[in-house]
Image (cartoon, rainbow, N blue to C red):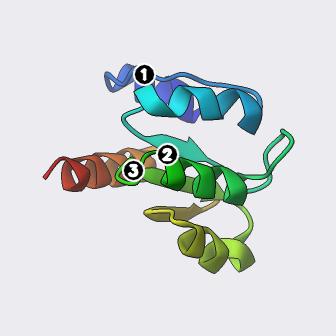
Amino acid sequence: MYTEYLRREGFNVREVGTTDDALPLVPDAAAVITGLMVPGSFDGVELIQRVRSQRSRTPILVVTALAQREAQAYDAGADVVLVKPCFPDTLLRELRKVMAESAS
């Protein structure tokens, strides 16, 4: 749902199935959107940490149903944590905001 919404809003979205597939795409990414419990050999928190070690200014947004892990995502380096249910327009607004902040 989020992928199609962001594409309709003009974003070039690369959707992957695992954290292992996501990590090689980070150098070319304008932003990273992830969950916390995602498939792969490492979870979303470790993905955030790895992104931060590669690209410190890349905006990272987390969309999760795990409200109790919100602080953990921020501690790992997430810029924004949105707890589900999260409307696509909320994600879009926050994405535009953090991308503008990272560009300045």
Q: Nearer the viewer, residue 62 or 65?
A: 62
> Helix or strand or loop: what does disc 3 sit on?
loop
In the rendered image, is residue 18 in sight? Answer: yes
Judged left or right of residue 104, residue 50 is right
Marks 1/2: CA–CA distance: 26 Å
Q: Earlier in the sequence, mark 1 or mark 2?
A: 1
Coordinates of residue 1 in the picture (x, y in percent): 60, 32
Residue identified by numbered label 1: 7
> Helix or strand or loop: what does disc 1 sit on?
helix
Q: Earlier in the sequence, mark 1 or mark 3?
A: 1
Coordinates of residue 24 in the picture (x, y in percent): 60, 27
Q: Earlier in the sequence, mark 3 or mark 2?
A: 2
* Disc ID at residue 41: none
Residue 66 drawn above or below residue 47? below
| Residue under the point 79% across and 45% down | 38
Residue identified by numbered label 2: 54
Which amino acid type is marked by label 2? Answer: Gln
**Quadrant of the image occupied by residue 66:** bottom right
Marks 3/2: CA–CA distance: 12 Å
Residue identified by numbered label 3: 59
Coordinates of residue 101 in the picture (x, y in percent): 21, 56
| Residue under the point 36% across and 47% down | 95
| Contact between labelled residues 2 and 3, with CB atoms less than 8 Å apart | no
